[in-house]
Amino acid sequence: MNATQDDQRELESALLRLNGRAWGISIGLVLAFGLFIATNLLVLKGGNDPGRHLRLIRVFFPGYSVSFIGSIIGFVYAFVLGYGLGRLIGSVYNRLSGNTAH
Amino acid sequence: MKVEIAPAAPPQLPVLELSSNIVSHMPEPLPRAISLAFAPLHKRAFGLAVGLAAGLSLLLATWIYLLRGPYPGENLALLSYYFTGYTVTWAGSFIGFCWGVGTGFVAGWFFAFCRNFVLALSIFWIRTRAEMAQSRDFLDHI
């Protein structure tokens, strides 16, 4: 097999496989901004007991609370979680569809 | 005298000669580079990938909850309304894993299906617009 065919095959594989890092960053940002906005909306809304249910996430995200600081902590947690999920989806997809990463 | 009869030649099929005009209007296959750029998602693989991610998420969530102890108001057991047999126990976490894989697979497969469908529609739309643009000056040739 000559170099041109190798290049062609590598190009096809690169185009067909999912980019795990891009998927990780995308899902991470979606989750992170989702939690950040949801938290701050409740903070801005105020009330006697803001975020009574949302604060239950602290079981899984230690340090998180329904406050501005807590929303930043939640942002980091959610991004890490989403990044991991995205990488997992990308790597499993590439393995199952036969588009292995080089 | 013995006469040998040669076998009859097979009937010649009429050869259709297509004019260059007709040939030019036949839909051509997409170039390789374009078809790669618009490659569809593998539905089954994507469904399994999302299913595995969802199943592992539910499994780990249950384990974290079990390890960190019960919190007032926190009730993962409410998931049993949707996931029959799921409980917040070590055994229930594996049932939840199966449910997560199942629902995740359906969601991922459907997402890939919709994505491929929209992609196919957009290719059709682009091709139709290009063909219409080519025949825009049709009346000028009459």
Image (tube, grey):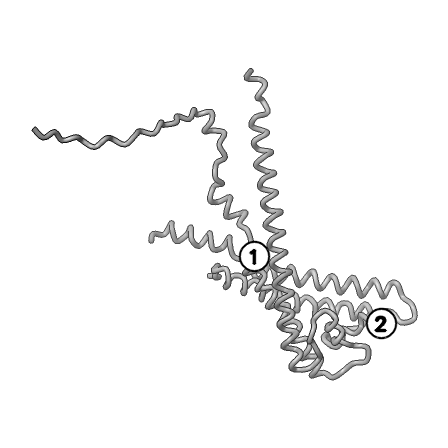
Q: What is the three-letter code of the residue carrying label 2?
A: Arg
| Crowd tier of the residue under label 2, counting other residues whose Cα lies within 10 Å: few below 14, some 14–19, many 20 or above | few
Tell me the residue at 30%/30% (across/down). B11
Of marks 2 and 1, the one in the foreground: 1
What residue did someone put label 1 on? B43
**Among the 4 quarters of the image, the one containing residue A49:** bottom right
Q: Which of A89 and B115 is in front in this view?
A: B115
Q: Nearer the viewer, residue A90 or B92?
A: B92
Mark 1 secondary-structure assignment? helix
Tell me the residue at 55%/51% (across/down). B40
Residue B98 is situated, as x and y percent measured from the top left of the image, at: 62, 72
Is residue A63 at least partly visible in the picture? Answer: no
Tell me the residue at 21%/32% (across/down). B7
Q: What is the three-letter code of the residue carrying label 1?
A: Lys
Residue extending furthest left? B1
Mark 2–mark 1 Cα distance, whole angstroms, equals 39 Å
Residue extending furthest front? B1
The circle drawn on residue A52 is 2
Number of marks present in the image shown: 2
Query: What chain does badge 1 belong to?
Result: B
Is residue A18 at least partly visible in the picture? Answer: yes
Taking the image as shown, residue B93 lies to the left or right of residue A54, namely left
Q: In this view, does B132 lie above or below B71?
A: above
Q: In this view, does B126 lie above or below B43?
A: above
| Crowd tier of the residue under label 1, counting other residues whose Cα lies within 10 Å: few below 14, some 14–19, many 20 or above | many
Residue A43 is situated, as x and y percent measured from the top left of the image, at: 85, 66
Q: In this view, does A35 lie above or below B29?
A: below
Taking the image as shown, residue B101 lies to the left or right of residue A16, namely right
Residue B90 is situated, as x and y percent measured from the top left of the image, at: 66, 82
